[in-house]
Image: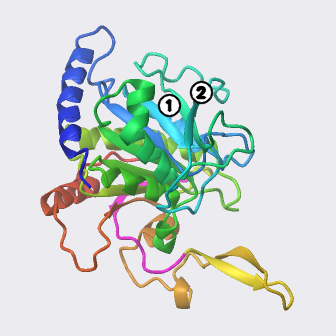
Amino acid sequence: MRTYLALSAAAAVLAAAGATAYATTPDRTEKTLPLAGMRILISNDDSMQAAKASNSDGLGLYELRRAMCAAGADVVVMAPWQVQSGKGTAVTNGGVLTAQRRTALPAGYENDCAQAPARGAVYGVCLADGPCTEDSPSATPADTVQLALRAGLKAKAGWTEAPDVVLTGINSGPNVSASVNDSGTVGAAVAAIDQGVPAIAFSSSGDESNLNFPRVNYRAHAEFGARFLAGLRQRSLLTGEFALKVDYPDVSTGRRAGTPVWTRVGDGAVVYHAFEQRGTGDSFDIALGLCPVDGTGEGECAEGRKDADSTWLLDKGHVTVAPITWDRTYGTPAGARRELTAIERYVEREAPRP
């Protein structure tokens, strides 16, 4: 299960050496390029299309790619071909996956990674024996990470060792409380730590209507994410024992995001699946129900944790950080207690402010 743990440690040594090399070149210093020499895989569950006016199908991925390359990282993207929101940790058990490189990137993002060795290559992964087409079924988020770590990065980018970190997102909408179990963004991060590779899952709130996802939210989150990752790297806090989930509030109205807060996943719900029978037949329409965001809901909407991610993000407007483990065994003590405590201290005391 920890196939890449040793490789990840070796990659960290190589990354440090790469950072030193970068620092010796004119105008490319460790101070201005805090992620120099770092190799990053990016995936998501919103696809790599970025074609919808609502910005719900992958625009956050390109903002994350932009920020990481600007900070000096070498980035490769392998993401689902189609939107795969709500797929959790689902995987495909048979067939053929095709990782098809996207040559025409969304306007404004074409040259973001031009100076990086991998050029920020973007691959969409579909379930097809041949080229991906408009209607090709998609790989799941976990599929894309497993493919990348086990074969894809070596074949497409020449990376013979694991990346230093896997970043997933930026998701269109927060992943908090019960929705974390459904999240493909979080599921892709879990697929990375399942292989011993450090991972961070990023999700951003939408506007007040929750129907649109302003670019300004993605950009603010991505730029914070690059500084947050740089701080983890500087303190040697990247670990494959658990993933980090980082959610960002809506700042599209000019409200400043609150300081980062260490949280737990809430035990209530923010959204839930609702089912309405069609007449008296066998069919049921699927809809999403929305719980009150002030914690006053009842039943599955009730939130019982004072340190819940949903409370601090949606009610109080803070950046929230929560640790996510791959181990679903109830009552298992944290195996990386020292790292967990150190990262909590970093988030609460030392992490960059939005």
Q: How many marks?
A: 2
Lower position in the chain sequence, tag 2 or tag 1:
1
Residue 287 position (above or below residue 157):
below
Magenta extent: 255-269
Q: What residue type is labelled 1?
A: Arg
Q: Nearer the viewer, residue 195 or 112?
A: 195
Question: Which residue carries the number 2 mark?
Answer: 109
Q: In this view, does 202 lie to the left or right of 289?
A: left
- Any magenta on residue 31? no
User: Residue 191 in the image: x percent, y percent?
Assistant: 39, 54
User: Residue 187 in the image: x percent, y percent?
Assistant: 45, 58
Judged from the image, the secondary structure of the residue bearing numbered disc 2 is: loop
Q: Which of 209 and 109 is in front in this view?
A: 109
Q: In this view, does 342 lie to the left or right of 221?
A: left
Judged from the image, the secondary structure of the residue bearing numbered disc 1 is: helix
Q: Quadrant of residue 39?
A: top left
Q: Report crowding for label 2: few under 14, some 14 to 19, many 20 or more residues within 10 A (C-alpha).
A: few
Q: Quadrant of the N terminus?
A: bottom left
- What residue do we see at 19% from left, 23% from top? 17
Of all residues shown, which one is farthest toward the left? 338
Residue 318 position (above or below residue 171):
below
Q: Is residue 42 left or right of residue 73?
A: right
- What residue do we see at 38% from left, 43% from top? 166
Question: Which residue carries the number 1 mark?
Answer: 66
* Gap in angstroms between the C-alphas marked 2 and 1: 7 Å
- What residue do we see at 76% from left, 84% from top? 276
Residue 174 position (above or below residue 9):
below
